[in-house]
Structures are given as C-alpha cells and as structure tokens.
Amino acid sequence: MPELLPSLKAGTQQEHQLLEDRLDLFNRVTDLANYRRLLEGFFTLYEPLEQCLGNVIDWRALNWDFDGSRKTPWLVEDLINLGLSQTDIDSLPRCPNLPEIDSASKAVGSLYVLEGSTLGGQLITKRFSSSLGTAPDRGGRFFSGYDEGTVAHWRAFAAWVQSVEADLHAGEATIAARDTFRSFDLWLNRAPFS
Ligand code: HEM
C-alpha cells in the first residue's frame, strides 16, 4: 500500500492552500512584466534548491532521474524568451531561505513539492495562455510542464516514491515538504514579485 505520497499530500494541504491564496496569481499577474517577475521568483528558488537536492543524495543509486527532471532549465528558457540575457539571469539574487535538506527523507519530501507543482501548472498554463498569450516557446515552458505527459510523469514519480518509501522516514519527509512550501510562500510573496 502506498503511504508516503498520500501522507505528504495530507500533511501539506494547508501550506499549499496558503501559498495558493497568498499568491493570488490570477489577480496579481495581469501583464507580461508581472509574469516575468513571477518566473524570476520561481527561478531564484528552484535553481539553488535543485542544486542542493542534487548534492544531498545520489538519486541515480535510488533509480530516480533527478537531473533529467530538473525544472530550472525550463525557467531559464522562459526568462530568455521574455527578454532576459544570461548575464541578467546570473545576477538575479537567489532565495536565501531554502528548506534544510540533510537526509534522503527530507530530499524526497522537498522533491514532492517541486514535482507536484507541475500538476497545478496545468491549470496555470491554461489561464496564462489565454490571458497573456504565453506558450511553451513564449515564456510558458515552465508552467506547461510535461503537457499531456504531466500525469504520466507524476505517476512515474509516485511509483518511484512507493519503491523507496520503506527506507524513508515519513515524518522527516513531511517536515521538509512543509518547509519547502513555506520557502516558496515567503520568497514569492515577499513583495509583489519584485
Ligand atoms: C496559484 C497557484 C497554484 C494553483 C492554482 C495550484 C493548483 C493545484 C491543483 C489544481 C493541483 C491538483 C492537480 C491534480 O490533482 O490533478 C495541485 C497540486 C499540487 N500543487 Fe499546486 N497550485 C499552485 C501553486 C503551487 C506551487 C507554487 C507549488 C509548489 C511550489 C504547488 C505544489 C503542488 C503539489 C505538491 C501538488 C500535488 C498534491 C498531491 O496530489 O499530492 N502548487 N496544485
């Protein structure tokens, strides 16, 4: 019986709702300038967090293609399509308050948040493509995620979590998932995407 994923979902429901409510995306992001700042906010958290997760454990040994699933390259592609240069991107200040990830359980809990965000992305991409004209090659690569493959990728992630969960500590994973949501909340809501 899979247990970890449903328990991560239940254990972070409040944090997800709070983040969604406080982001208030569709009222706050009404033009491409706001949209670009939103993506800058995601990029400056995803990049250091994925770097940290990549260093904490050996994902290959656990049979998860972490490098092939990184979302940072999508965010870079979007920022370039929205007019930033690589130098602009390099000079964006990175999120200083990352969740503390010092174990495999915490890494998996944090990764749950990053992978799960592709599910919400499916709804977000529909809204922004109609309101702002974004598309995968027009600043919408990150939110479009795996497109029609999103559910399949999520199922693969769920199956993988199930295959490793016996060796993980559910409490630690949940703490890390909550902390990850909190980092997003604090960072993305620190000012109107500035
Ligand atoms: C306004 C912004 C957001 C909206 C409207 C939204 C919406 C949603 C929706 C509709 C789902 C369920 C999809 C499904 O079950 O098919 C979902 C799942 C999820 N979202 Fe969000 N989301 C938002 C932001 C975020 C962010 C910023 C993150 C993390 C950085 C995130 C993390 C997750 C996770 C982890 C799940 C998976 C829950 C589970 O089934 O275990 N979401 N979101």
Image (tube, rainbow, N blue to C red):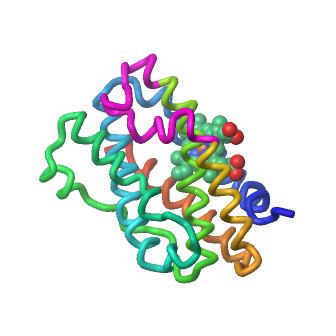
Could you tell whether 44 is left or right of 116 in the image?
left
Residue at x-position 73% and y-position 75%: 171
State yes or no: residue 35 in magenta.
Answer: no
Looking at the picture, how far across and down is residue 118, in whole percent?
A: 54, 44
The percent coordinates of residue 159 (x first, y second) are 70, 59
Residue 146 spot, x, y in % from top left: 50, 40
Q: Left or right of 66: which side holds 137?
A: left
The residue lying toward the viewer, choosing from 102 and 95, is 102
60 or 70, nearer to the observer: 60
Q: Residue furthest right?
A: 1
Which quadrant holds residue 31?
top left
Above or below residue 145? Residue 175 is: below
The quadrant in which the N terminus is found is bottom right
Q: Residue 113: name its quadrant.
A: bottom right
In this view, the residue in front, 177 or 126, is: 126
- Please provide the residue range marked out in magenta: 128-151
Instruction: Please report the residue visible at 56 percent of the width from the left and 33 percent of the height from the top.
Output: 148
Total numbered badges shown on the rendered structure? 0
Location of ligand 1 given as a quarter of the image: top right
Q: Residue at x 17, y 57 (%)?
A: 91
Image position, residue 80 (x, y; %): 22, 40
Q: Residue at x 63, y 76 (%)?
A: 105
10 above or below 140?
Answer: below
113 left or right of 45?
right
Is residue 20 at least partly visible in the picture? no
Q: Is residue 143 magenta?
A: yes
Q: Quadrant of residue 97?
A: bottom left
Q: Is residue 48 above or below residue 22?
A: below
Q: Is residue 80 visible?
A: yes
Quadrant location, the C terminus = top left
